[in-house]
Image (spheres, grey):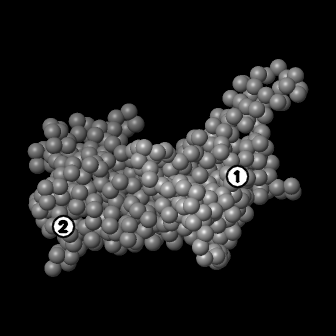
């Protein structure tokens, strides 16, 4: 059957008429539409995460009785001209559907208030083009000749264990939008505009029918901003505590990332001989991410020498020189989108100098101090405070601070933060900086619970031109980052198997180069 769609819901394919040679003749169209074997859709069993996604939807439903909730996947984003970035569905959409790297652009999840209680979930997506349509061969966005076979409505419904309808049916949802309808605004700005227009029409009709004094504009503003912001917040907070399936995914992501670090170390002799060795380090790790997962969870940081003092160095165009340290901050993202986030700082020649070791072991001391406070009932910000006590004490001992460590730790001071301006921890999961829209009292001031996963990543960064530090420290940057699971009795370092101490790292490199 030909794909019928609502034009307002589907962006037109980008024009390439100035260079197109796609056949348009009547004879070609008749011939290409014939002679195909009959399709037999094999319905897959529901994927492992389907019941977990259903439970998440139920939790969200309980927070919004009687309100329609719209969570789009998002659309392709243009990279240049007629090329796009690889599609990644919005994390909230993936979390609620169980769809990951195989998500379809333009899909929308709608939670419609049920007649009795709760919500009925329906996933709308652009079903595959029939072979009797020109989209089948001529549309580079969805055509099977261009991007390969796409699933049917029935296959997606079976796979995700959720009701599924074609994208054209989403027009009825837009017609039903009222002032109580909420949308995840950031996921698909184009579709959000259509929801806003529908809200405005609803408000205008209500005003006209009731002779109300409120203007349509004021009603729209009241309905648009705060409630939608609350939905984004609640979707973010829904991920603060991971379920059993998510924790298993985190373990797999960490294990794949560990293999990526092994690959990088094994390749260091080659990387250290190249004019842009950091690029080789990045490439080696990214190869592992693509082979064992979906991609990298974020741009790999391969920061050698003084580049390690630049917190988000992702240009990765420098040399990897013997005698320097290389700070590698990287994580494998699985097909489920769950990602690890690990940092190790390695001596390129396999052995730390005395000063490098001193800095490295201080950072590890700070990480261990932070880990020691992790347990159910602790406050998230106390993890950072524990690391900062070590950083303040050691930098004071080295004569870098104009005040004592105790004075530096006072709220109005913080001189030690010159050498570590970032935080020690962030939540981790389907986003590398997960739960970012959660309220402060749920995040930074939140109480730790079993199932939470976050990083511990203290560092010390002594800029090459920082005259407050002795010359031998300048240009040294060290970060150690691990992924931590809060358990019923304390904490588990999910990445503990990746060598952490200076001695362990040196032995690790030696073993890979033996």
Q: Quadrant of residue 179?
A: top right
Disc 2 + disc 1, Cβ < 8 Å: no
Query: Can residue 461 be seen from the camera position used here?
Result: no
Q: Decide: few, some or many residues near mark 2? Use Cα within 10 Å; few <14, some 14-19, many ≥20.
A: many
Within 10 Å of the Cα at label 1, are there few (<14), some (14-19), or many (20+) other Cα atoms?
Answer: some
- Tag 1 residue: 168
The answer to which of 202 and 449 lies nearer the viewer is 202
Q: Residue at x 35, y 48 (%)?
A: 388
Q: Residue furthest front?
A: 27
Image quarter (top left, top right, bottom left or bottom right) of the C terminus? bottom left
Q: How many marks?
A: 2
47 vs 264, left or right, is right
Q: Position of residue 431 (x, y in %)?
A: 48, 55
* Residue 302 visible in the picture: yes
Placement of 488 over or under 211, stated as above or below: below
Marks 2 and 1, how far apart at CA: 53 Å
Residue visible at 37% across and 38% down?
410
Helix, strand or loop at mark 1 = helix
- Answer with left or right where residue 451 lies relative to residue 480: right
Position of residue 279 measured from the top left corner of the image (x, y, whole percent): 23, 57
> Which image quadrant is residue 333 in?
bottom left
Q: Which residue is mark 2?
A: 268
Q: SS of the residue at dot 2?
A: helix
- Residue 17 is left or right of residue 507, and the answer is right
Write down the quadrant of residue 188 in the picture.
top right
Q: Is residue 431 above or below residue 209?
A: below
Name which residue lies at 80% across and 48% down.
66
Label 2 vs 1, first from the N-terminus: 1
In the image, taking residue 13 as reference, residue 61 lies left or right, namely: right
Camera-nearest residue between 457 and 93? 93
Q: Quadrant of the N terminus?
A: bottom right
Does residue 171 sit above or below 213 in this rendering?
below
């Amino acid at each position: 059957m030909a794909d019928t769609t609502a034009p307002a819901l589907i962006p037109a394919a980008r024009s390439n008429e100035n260079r197109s040679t796609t056949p348009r003749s009547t004879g070609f169209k008749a011939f290409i539409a014939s002679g195909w074997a009959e399709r037999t859709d094999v319905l897959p069993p529901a994927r492992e995460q389907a019941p977990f996604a259903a439970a998440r939807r139920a939790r969200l439903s309980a927070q919004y009785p009687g309100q329609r909730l719209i969570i789009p996947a998002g659309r392709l984003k243009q990279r240049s001209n007629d090329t796009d970035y690889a599609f990644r569905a919005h994390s909230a959409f993936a979390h609620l559907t169980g769809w990951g790297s195989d998500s379809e652009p333009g899909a929308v999840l709608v939670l419609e208030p049920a007649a009795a209680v709760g919500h009925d979930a329906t996933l709308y997506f652009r079903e595959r083009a029939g072979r009797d349509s020109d989209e089948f061969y001529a549309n580079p966005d969805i055509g099977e000749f261009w991007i390969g076979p796409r699933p049917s409505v029935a296959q997606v419904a079976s796979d995700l264990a959720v009701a599924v309808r074609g994208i054209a049916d989403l027009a009825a949802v837009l017609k039903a939008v009222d002032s109580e309808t909420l949308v995840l605004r950031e996921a698909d700005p184009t579709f959000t505009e259509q929801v806003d227009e529908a809200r405005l029409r609803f408000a205008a009709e209500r005003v006209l029918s009731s002779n109300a004094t409120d203007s349509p504009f004021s009603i729209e503003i009241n309905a648009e901003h705060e409630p939608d912001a609350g939905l984004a917040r609640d979707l973010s907070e829904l991920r603060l505590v991971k379920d059993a399936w998510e924790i298993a995914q985190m373990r797999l992501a960490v294990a794949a990332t560990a293999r990526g670090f092994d690959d990088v170390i094994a390749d260091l002799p080659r990387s250290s001989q190249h004019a842009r060795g950091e690029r080789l380090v990045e490439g080696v790790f990214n190869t592992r991410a693509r082979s064992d997962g979906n991609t990298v969870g974020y741009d790999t940081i391969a920061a050698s020498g003084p580049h390690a003092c630049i917190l988000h160095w992702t240009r990765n165009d420098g040399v990897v020189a013997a005698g320097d340290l290389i700070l590698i901050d990287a994580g494998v993202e699985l097909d489920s989108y769950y990602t690890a986030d690990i940092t190790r700082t390695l001596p390129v020649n396999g052995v730390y100098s005395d000063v490098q070791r001193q800095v490295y072991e201080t950072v590890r001391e700070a990480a261990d101090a932070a880990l020691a406070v992790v347990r159910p009932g602790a406050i998230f910000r106390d993890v950072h405070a524990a690391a900062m006590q070590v950083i303040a004490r050691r930098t004071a001992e080295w004569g870098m601070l104009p005040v004592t460590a105790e004075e530096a730790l006072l709220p109005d001071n913080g001189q030690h933060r010159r050498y570590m301006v970032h935080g020690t921890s962030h939540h981790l999961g389907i986003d590398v900086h997960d739960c970012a829209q959660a309220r402060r009292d749920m995040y930074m001031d939140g109480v730790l619970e079993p199932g939470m996963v976050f990083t511990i990543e203290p560092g010390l960064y002594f800029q090459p031109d920082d005259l407050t530090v002795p010359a031998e420290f300048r240009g040294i940057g060290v970060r150690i980052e691990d992924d931590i699971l809060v358990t019923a009795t304390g904490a588990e370092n999910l990445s503990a198997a990746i060598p952490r101490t200076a001695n362990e790292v040196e032995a690790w490199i030696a073993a890979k180069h033996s």
